Image (cartoon, rainbow, N blue to C red):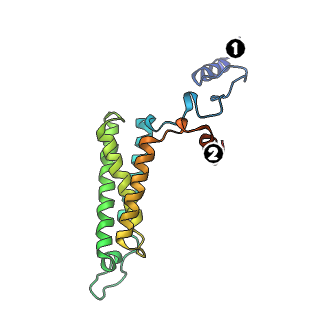
């Protein structure tokens, strides 16, 4: 008679979709690009978005509390100890940075709460909150670089966001020509 351990293994293999005995075919025998594991930007589920929203919340919180350039260590010419150096040296850049950080933190928190309370992942609320959170994170990164002009930073941000909007809206890897699919597979090491 069986002690029960083998039965538990069998149940686990059935749950994972595998066959007992080790003769398990690869999950995507076609080599990628088609079938059940085809890349699809429309297939974002709530769990994935929840992880991304949590990461954006953490990053925007860190950015808001650890401002690039640091803080003044002493009282001096027009500043007090603990004031952000960026605010005194690059005032417009600082306020754009902080506004983007606050917008990113707030929208990622709304996204997190929405997903936890059952708002569908494909809803306009989730898409809008994700767009604001992600674009705010990109804007905080771009504006944290004080050696570039602020107008150039904003132009770069607009360009990056436009490119991402086009790619995520219109590009599906499984609809590319075969040579492009092969190039992406080679780039990704598949």
Q: How crowded is mark 1: few (under 14 residues within 10 Å), some or many (20 or more)?
A: few
Q: Residue at x 60, y 43 (%)?
A: 180
- Placement of the C terminus among the 4 image quadrants: top right
Q: Earlier in the sequence, mark 1 or mark 2?
A: 1
* 64 left or right of 51 in image: left
**Image: 179 above or below 68:** above
* 168 left or right of 38 in image: left
Q: Is residue 182 visible?
A: yes
**Image: 111 above or below 30:** below
**Residue on which disc 1 sits:** 2
Which residue is the extreme one toward the bottom? 77
Residue 54: horizontal and vertical position, in percent?
40, 48
Q: Residue at x 32, y 48 (%)?
A: 109
Q: Residue at x 53, y 39 (%)?
A: 173
Determine the image quadrant of residue 60.
Answer: bottom left
Marks 1/2 in contact by CB < 8 Å: the verdict is no
Out of 136 and 187, give the one closest to the viewer.
187
**Residue on which disc 2 sits:** 183
């Amino acid at each position: 008679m069986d002690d029960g351990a083998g039965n538990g293994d069998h149940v686990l293999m059935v749950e994972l979709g595998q066959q007992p005995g080790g003769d398990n075919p690869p999950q995507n025998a076609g080599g990628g690009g088609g079938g059940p594991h085809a890349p699809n930007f429309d297939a974002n589920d709530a769990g994935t978005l929840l992880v991304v929203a949590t990461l954006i919340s953490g990053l925007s919180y860190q950015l808001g509390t650890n401002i690039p350039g640091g803080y003044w260590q002493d009282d001096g010419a027009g500043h007090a100890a603990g004031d952000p150096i960026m605010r005194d040296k690059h005032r417009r850049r600082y306020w754009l940075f902080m506004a983007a950080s606050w917008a990113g933190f707030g929208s990622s928190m709304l996204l997190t709460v929405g997903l936890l309370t059952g708002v569908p992942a494909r809803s306009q609320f989730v898409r809008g909150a994700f767009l604001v959170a992600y674009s705010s994170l990109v804007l905080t990164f771009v504006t944290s670089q004080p050696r570039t002009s602020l107008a150039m930073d904003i132009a770069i941000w607009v360009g990056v966001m436009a490119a991402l909007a086009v790619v995520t809206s219109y590009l599906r890897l499984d609809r590319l020509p075969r040579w492009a699919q092969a190039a992406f597979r080679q780039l990704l090491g598949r």
